[in-house]
Image (cartoon, grey):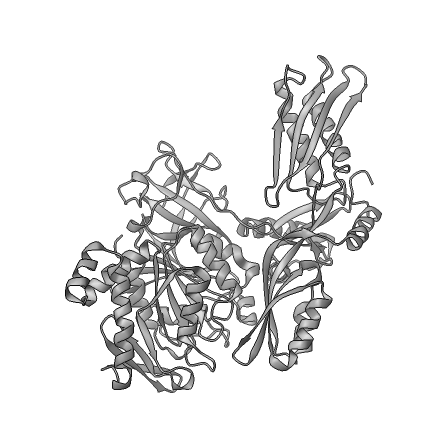
Amino acid sequence: MQNVRNIGIMAHIDAGKTTVSERILFYSGKIHRMGEVHDGEATMDFMDQERERGITITSAAATTMWRDHQITLIDTPGHVDFTAEVERSLRVLDGAVALFCAVGGVQPQSEQVWRQSEKYGVPKIAFINKLDRVGADFYAVIGEIRDEFQVAAVPIAIPMGQEDRFQGMVDLVRMKAVRYDETGKGSVSTEIEIPASMREEAAKWRHRLMEASAEQDDMLLEAFLSRGELSPEEIVRGLRKGTLARKLVPVLGGSALKNKGVQSLLDAVVDFLPSPLETPIPVAEGELAGGSAGSDDGPFAALAFKIISDRHIGKLTLLRIYSGRIGSGTSVWNSTRRSEQRIARIVRMYANRQEALEDAGAGDIVGVIGLSDVQTGDTLCLRDKPIVLESMEFPAPVVSISLKAGERSESDRLSAALRRLADEDPTFVVGYDEETAETVVSGMGELHLEVLVERMRREYGVNVQTGRPEVAYRETATVVAEGEYKHVKQTGGHGQYGHVRLILEPMPPGESFEFVNEIRSGRIPAEYIASVEKGVVKAMRRGPHAGYPVVDVRVRLVDGSYHEVDSSDMAFQEAALMGFRQVFLKTQPDLLEPVMSVEVVVPEEFMGAAAGSICQRRGRIESMEQAAGARVLYCFVPLAEMFGYAGVIRTLTQGRGSFTMHFERYEAVPFEIERQIVEKRIREKRVPGA
């Protein structure tokens, strides 16, 4: 496993992830012809919609070889609507290449994916792409990486020229220059001596590189202080140690589209990113090989990190194997769902194609066929050696639409499509609104839902009709309130009796919900306490203020009573549900709306129009920056005001403006808008008891 690398490429949209992936596959000999994103021919963008839109929608995996090392590469999406793909990929990868545009630098989604990688403790190297573009600034991007992420960004190569004068890179480890000579579409690299005009600058940066490397190891530090120099092997050893400890990030650069710098990037992947042996196993319950990466001889343990519904082979489950070995026909225990299933086939993933394998072992990322009862985040292991690996957390969806089949005869196909897509995507939530008798689906944004609806039409042949997007509002309490409810109902035979007194308190944002049992002296028997909590949770799903979920409240059960004959689980659930609704309305409830962090990039002459469009949408402009002849506006805008904004910004800027956004936080809706929303929900009979 020492010669295995499981890596991902992560970046802001349009930084060049898929282009870099394509070059990696080409130079490592996996493909013999490079496809381009703009031509719709990239290997890793295999979905029709990816090729039409020129963006990555789903993470794709491919395995290749470089310097006798097996490299499994996952190309992740850059658009924030598909953040779940990044989340699950980073959860199972050992290292990552953080890709930055030499012009755009650190952008909003760059920050988002960096935070996700830090959550899972993923070591990183950085590649600054597009050094031949107008406005490229290698050193400015390094400064941004240091400032934004508070990490030591250490160049291991520096550019010879930038923009249209970009000629190559100076390798600071070996103190050699690599010149790229244009040959039609691509380029040929030639190793040369460092030009005289750059020797002083290269020496300065190499000294900094040696200092950074020496600081990672006492022996290296002693050698550096005594000799004033480190060998290339010593530099690599120190940098590798610092990278694995996430104390520093080696940085290099190039231009992937022109085939410049990709071989050096592959070398850096091998030199600095960890093998599975150097990656801790994220054990949540049980024991496994001391908590570090296992071996083929250890007990089997794997995480199901992605589900793919394939029309030809059925349900394909992608696994990261942390320990042990499996073969076709092996029975495995799903410790998450406590069920046993048999693996029919094992395949190596190559974008949308598969290569059959006899078996797979620790460190491998593979697909398996035959596991019908498995979901994203489940642990697979041996029944007699159970273990549970840490699962994944996905953000809650923020946009909802209603949908139905165009023809009644298509209803079954629609249900099947929704089921399979929900299996694949944890951020795609399917529900049913009993009040309106509509199927409601929720996702991470307009583009996310648009892509999924189009997949239903293309892949499942369903003529889907959709309703207007709706915002995932929330309700919360603002003051403490107390009240009681007594559920008494007499029918033939046993009646129903449940009595609760509740105190509701607001909690800090993001705290969700807390239930506190303060019953003393058996006023309510212990077996009914859980019933009270169930009733409260049920009431919170459809808040009494506007019919939206209730968040950030503490519910204290302080008193109540019961009847020896008529009390039951259902009676106390009903008492808690109705009691919560009544008390919640006394808490002066607020309606909360998702607020997005928005970055708008427009040419200088359209800055005023763009700023005005943000203000019209109740947005707050936090700052403005100059970037390569354009203005960048950093804003916070309610999601409700951002629907259709892509068309607006294109119209305002003659097609030259763009924007990106991601969820930031929930904030209270202004009073007048809240009143209108509540009144509309009541008219539509979507508020409980309305």
Given the current orientation, which residue lies at the most extreme right position? Answer: 683
Task: Identify the residue at image location x=43%, y=62%.
Answer: 351
Classify residue 212 as left or right of residue 114.
left
Please state the horizontal and vertical placement of residue 151, each as a whole percent of the image.
39, 60
Q: Quadrant of residue 380?
A: top left
Write the residue at 43% across / 65% down: 145
**Is 386 displayed left or right of 456 in the figure?**
left
Please state which of residues 29 and 411 is positioned toward the viewer in this rendering. 29
- Residue 69 appears anywhere in the view: no
- In depth, the one of 505 and 485 nearer the eye is 505
Viewer-side residue, 504 vs 267: 504
Which residue is depicted at the point 34% across and 78% down? 159
Quick one: which residue is furthest to the top in this view?
564
Is 509 on the left-hand or right-hand side of 352?
right
Vertical side of 227 occupied by 296: above or below? above
Is 205 placed above or below 190 here?
above
Q: What is the residue that sits farthest to the left in this orientation?
A: 227
Q: Quadrant of residue 565?
A: top right
Labels in figure, total: 0
Percent of width and height locating residue 672: 80, 54
Residue at far front of view: 225
Q: Is residue 473 visible?
A: yes
Q: Quadrant of residue 188?
A: bottom left
Drawn side of residue 363 relative to residue 615, left or right: left
Residue 510: % across, % down = 59, 45
User: Where residue 492 sits in the image (x, y, percent)?
Assistant: 81, 16
Task: Determine the residue positioned at 34% across, 35% down.
Answer: 287
The quarter in which the C terminus is drawn is top right
Q: Is residue 353 above or below residue 26?
A: above
